[in-house]
């Protein structure tokens, strides 16, 4: 475009098509500027509310930390009890992925959900808290460690400085984590996720817990859709069920090792973000992503 002496485009010397396109770009630019101002106002409001909320929670940080540790230990202990139950009482062993028709050992998470299911909607509320806790913990872990391949840092997640590719990879990882969480709930609380609050009348009187063996009979306990889906996968492909079983043991071993190390170690925990090495991390990302 030809410019005037003051630096503005000379619309009189433009073609009609160029003038129309220039006006359209100007309108789009003004719209984007207004949208940017609105986003900045929203960020200022959020930046004002979140510190106030965190400041309000400071007196309760010990209680919140102990509650989070209790939830983590509950999940790990329930997972361990289910794995031991499958190892001891499975009829087919590794040939069917240590499938279990009826739970025999004590499972704290399963019993808690079964007890809360008597009062609607306490069980859904506690289940939502558990899923939200695992989701937030997973996001915090990925943000703290970054997206890595082995020991190589591929993407670093920084506040308001993350690359779009890093956010896309983060969303993909979270979708896989949610899928794995659906399978993990089948191990953490097997009876609750399979039958909910259902019970079965016994011939001797009274009622008992449902099981896969009892649920196979007509007019008995109804198996949930997610339990039926994963049980069919375990029957058709027992190799995947066996791999998943030993992967749970690997998770418990890693959790126990890291928990013991953090409990006995006197080193101060490092923060997930460092202002000093952000430029070095960005240079490392660009070096890994640039084609050779």
Image (tube, rainbow, N blue to C red):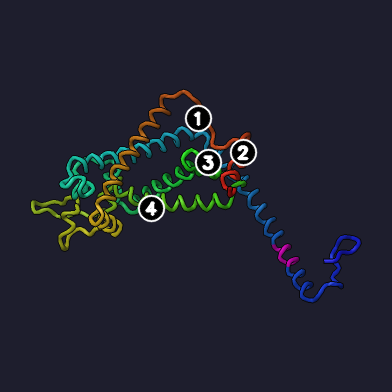
Separation of marks 3 and 4 at Cα, in angstroms: 25 Å
Identify whether 145 is placed above or below 16.
above
Discs 3, 2 touching: Cβ within 8 Å: no
Number of other residues with Cα within 10 Å of mark 2, as a class: few under 14, some 14 to 19, many 20 or more:
some
Q: What's the mark number on residue 278?
A: 2
Q: Earlier in the sequence, mark 2 or mark 1?
A: 1
> Residue 153, position in %: x, y?
53, 41
Q: Residue furthest front?
A: 292
- Secondary structure of the residue carrying tag 1 is loop
The residues tagged by marks 2 and 4 sit, at their Cα atoms, a distance apart of 32 Å
Image disc number at residue 153? 3
Say few, some or many: other residues with alpha carbon within 10 Å of mark 3 (under 14 / 14 to 19 / 20 or more).
some
The residue carrying mark 1 is 269
Queried whether the magenta region covers residue 59, the answer comes back as no
Q: Earlier in the sequence, mark 3 or mark 4?
A: 3
Circle number at residue 179: 4
Q: Residues within 10 Å of mark 4 (few under 14, many from 20)?
A: few
Q: Nearer the viewer, residue 223 or 278?
A: 278
Circle 1 packing at 10 Å, graded few (<14), some (14-19), many (20+), is few
Camera-nearest label, 3 or 2: 3
Q: Mark 2, mark 4: which one is toward the viewer?
A: 2
In the rendered structure, the answer to whether residue 131 lies left or right of residue 32 reads left
SS label for mark 2: helix
Which quadrant holds the N terminus?
bottom right
x, y percentage for residue 134? 41, 45
Q: Cα distance, mark 3 to mark 1? A: 20 Å
């Amino acid at each position: 475009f030809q410019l005037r002496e003051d630096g503005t485009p000379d619309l009189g010397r433009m073609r009609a098509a160029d003038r129309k396109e220039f006006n359209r770009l100007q309108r789009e630019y003004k719209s984007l500027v207004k949208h940017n101002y609105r986003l900045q106002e929203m960020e200022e409001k959020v930046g004002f509310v979140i510190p106030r909320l965190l400041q309000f929670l400071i007196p309760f940080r010990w209680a919140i930390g102990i509650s989070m540790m209790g939830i983590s230990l509950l999940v790990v202990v329930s997972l361990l009890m289910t794995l031991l139950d499958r190892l001891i009482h499975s009829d087919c062993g590794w040939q069917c992925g240590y499938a279990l028709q009826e739970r025999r050992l004590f499972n704290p998470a399963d019993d808690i959900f079964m007890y809360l299911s008597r009062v609607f909607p306490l069980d859904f509320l506690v289940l939502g808290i558990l899923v939200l806790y695992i989701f937030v913990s997973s996001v915090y872990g990925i943000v703290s460690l970054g997206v890595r391949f082995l020991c190589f840092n591929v993407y670093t997640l920084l506040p308001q400085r993350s690359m779009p590719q890093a956010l896309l990879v983060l969303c993909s990882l979270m979708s896989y984590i949610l899928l794995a969480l659906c399978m993990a709930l089948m191990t953490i609380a097997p009876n609750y996720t399979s039958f909910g609050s259902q019970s079965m009348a016994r011939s001797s009187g009274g009622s008992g817990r449902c099981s896969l063996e009892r649920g196979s009979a007509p007019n008995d306990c109804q198996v949930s859709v997610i339990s039926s889906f994963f049980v069919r996968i375990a029957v058709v492909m027992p190799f995947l069920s066996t791999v998943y079983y030993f992967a749970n043991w690997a998770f418990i071993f890693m959790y126990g090792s890291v928990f013991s190390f953090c409990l006995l170690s006197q080193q101060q925990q490092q923060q997930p973000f460092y202002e000093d090495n952000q430029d070095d991390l960005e240079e490392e990302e660009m070096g890994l992503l640039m084609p050779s």
